[in-house]
Every structure is written in structure tokens, then in C-alpha cells.
Image (cartoon, rainbow, N blue to C red):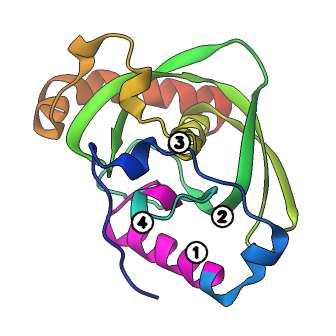
Amino acid sequence: MSLRKIATIGHPVLRTVARELTAEELARASTQALLDDLVETMRDANGAGLAANQIYEPVRICAIEQRKHNPRYPDKPAFPLTILVNPTIEPLSPETFLNYEGCLSVPDLRGEARRFAEIRVRAWDRDANPWVREIRGLTAGTFQHEIDHLEGKLFLDRVEDPRSLCTLREFERWHLASFAERARSLVARFGA
């Protein structure tokens, strides 16, 4: 395993639609090593998720994990390490919420992105086994954020009101308390 460099906004790889993998490609030692590097890089950067194209590999793979006490996302509920290969999303209802998001590829910036409150995610796990789950609340926002990366989209593309954009410092100073209240409400309602 090794830490990879994370691409930042402006690099073309972040606007590239990632290609799907075959089961044979996924089984290769090089792809399995990429998965390990993806997880190690995400954890080192205190991310809640990381997509392969964020580490310059435009393939449809992402990792999601919300550890307790993550300093970047203290209000997100814990979620175990999940590897998604060739994921797709299906909204389960039209209900949405505004999620204050940040991104390792957009350093020191937060903004409100609209996300579906309930989704179904279909993918393979790292062994090409089918993985299907219904995901709700803040965690659903995390899944949508990472899968957007695989479509060449950044959370900035989902920001409806650019006045919500702020540095992390100003987010913590002016917006964290109100977002934390909104987050607690979502977690209480959806458990996630």
C-alpha cells in the first residue's frame, strides 16, 4: 500500500467520466493494489470517501468510510469501509436536503449541495460480488458525492447558491452550528 497524490480542481482527470471495470480487471493484483492505495490515501487525508479518479485513475471505483471522530466531518454518523465498483444510484423519493460539503480535491472550500435523502446504490464489492443497499440521510449525501466524481462532477456543480461557498475556517465560524443542527435532525430521522 502507498499514499497517492490527490488531484485538485482544475486537473482534467476530475472532469473525466470514469470507465467501468470488468470482473477480470477487478481481480488483477494491480487493481487490488489500487483499492488498497485508495483506502490508505482516504484515511490519511481524513476523507469520508475517495474516488479513483481523485488519485489519477479514471476507473469506476470509490471507497467510503466514516470513522468516528473524523475532524473533517464531526457530524456524520459512522459508516464502515465500503468499496464500490461500477456503482449506480437510484433515488428512492424526490425528497432532498442541502448538505454542506467539502472535498479533498477542492481544498479548504465548503458549500451547500443538494442531495437526495434516500437512494439505492448498486455496485460490486472488491471481489465482484453484487452489493445493493438503501442509503439515507447524510450518508446518502456522501455516496452521491463520491459517485458524482466517477461522472466527472464536483460538489461545486451541485451548489445552487454560490453565496454558500466559504473556506473551512469561515464555515466553522459562521455556518457549522446551523449545519450541525440540520445534520442532527437528518441523523435522528434516518439514522444515517
Q: Residues within 10 Å of mark 1 (few under 14, many from 20)?
A: many
Q: Nearer the viewer, residue 76 or 142?
A: 142
**Three-letter amino acid code at the position of disc 3:** Thr
Q: Is residue 23 above or below residue 91?
A: below
Tag 3 residue: 142
Decide which of tag 2 and tag 1 comes sooner along the chain. 1
Near mark 3 (Cα within 10 A), the count class, few <14, some 14-19 or many ≥20, is many
Cβ atoms under marks 3 and 4 closer than 8 Å: no
Q: Which numbered disc covers residue 51? A: none
Q: Which mark is residue 35?
A: 1
> CB under 8 Å between callouts 3 and 2?
no
Q: Tell me which label, 3 or 1, sits earlier in the chain.
A: 1
Q: Where's residue 65, x and y in %? A: 54, 60
Query: Is residue 154 located in the magenta-colored stretch of the structure?
Result: no
> CA–CA distance between discs 3 and 4?
13 Å
**Are the residues tagged 2 and 1 within 8 Å (C-beta)?**
yes
Magenta span: predominant SS is helix
Q: Earlier in the sequence, mark 3 or mark 4?
A: 4
The residue carrying mark 2 is 83
Q: Residue at x 56, y 46 (%)?
A: 150
Percent coordinates x, y for residue 8 in the rendering = 27, 51
Q: Which residues are magenta?
A: 31-53
User: From what the image shows, is residue 42 above or below residue 144?
Assistant: below
Closest to the camera, between mark 3 and mark 1, is 1
Q: Report the side of 103 relative to 61 (left or right).
A: left
Residue 42 — which label? 4
